[in-house]
Amino acid sequence: MSWWEDIAIGARRELGSYTFTEEEIIHFARKYDPQIFHLDPEAAKQTMFGGLIASGWHTAAVWMKLAIADREKSKAAGNPLQRAGVSPGFEDLKWLKPVRPGMTLTYSNEVIEKVALKSRPDMGIVKSLNEARDENGTVVFSFIGKGFVQRKPA
Amino acid sequence: MSETLHFEDFSIGRVFDCGTYELTKEEVFEFAGEFDPQPHHLDEDAANASMLKGLSASGWHVCAIAMRMLADGVILKAKGLGGVGAPEGRWMKPARPGETLRMEAEVISAKPSGSKPFGLVTFECRMFDRSEQIAMISMTPIIGKRA
């Protein structure tokens, strides 16, 4: 397992791709985001989006799904895992373009900053820029994630 | 849906009560199974041994619940035109299955579009369980102006 000290700023991982289906978009929206342009393909045509789009939190939740799958894949390949704990939160989450049924997004993660904690000398924070791109390479979703990672004992 | 709220109604400092939400274990497992399959969200024994000392909902599940509560409490009563983002999210305490969650949303910014019939409103959504605040998620939906 790797420590906070071992993580390099600029380290980048491709997390994989995901294709959003109409059925999944509607299923998520019924439970968590029942706005008409997430729920009803016909009625959505009359809105400013011109058709059904995924809830932004659905796009975010898929990031988590792919990040976990990537970690499992990395573990199975015998790579050292970060001594990662829970996350205190995120910053600057942006829904830049609508995500429509049939679109495939490719997600990535890049370490941008490491923060030592005076209050927790055994832990550090790693900040990373997470992005999802459409088939043309346009960024449609991004946020800065934060995670606690254990520090190497002195 | 009757639109009783317009961009002009979202003055800075106004607080909306977004009601309550029963967080069940089934729902915690369902969301985590699909989007966040980590042992502390899915397996009671592993969760008890983890840093969070017990089962808790995925942080992204908490965000999705905040969206639902903001939709029911505010956005579905207005002309909601989508959202541009969530400037900040803080997961402060674990969201435990069996809890009754409650949320309030305070307007912290309201920016009209100069030429267009809508504006951006940022809400600070504060979520509580029965005893304390567990999360803060700010969100910026686009809301239609009064016609």
Image: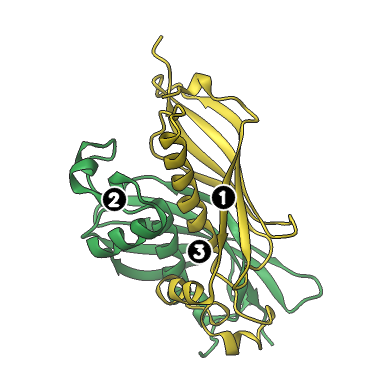
Chain colours: A yellow, B green
Q: Amino acid at mark 2?
A: Ser
Residue B140 pos. (x, y %): 59, 63
- What is the spatial separation of the Cα atoms under label 3 and label 2, in whole angstroms? 19 Å
Marks 1 and 2 belong to one chain: no
Q: What residue do we see at 41% from left, 9% from top?
A: A154
Which residue, given by chain and number where applicable, does mark 3 sit on? A58
Residue B99 pos. (x, y %): 23, 59
Label ID, residue A103: none
Q: Quadrant of residue A48?
A: bottom right
Horizontal side of B31 relative to A14 (left or right) equals left
Determine the secondary structure under disc 1: strand
Label ID, residue A16: 1
Q: Chain of mark 1?
A: A
Q: Chain of mark 3?
A: A
Determine the secondary structure under disc 3: helix
Which residue, given by chain and number where applicable, does mark 2 sit on? B56
The answer to whether the residue labelled 3 contacts the one labelled 2, judged by CB atoms less than 8 Å apart, is no
Q: Amino acid at mark 3?
A: His
Residue A153 pos. (x, y %): 39, 13
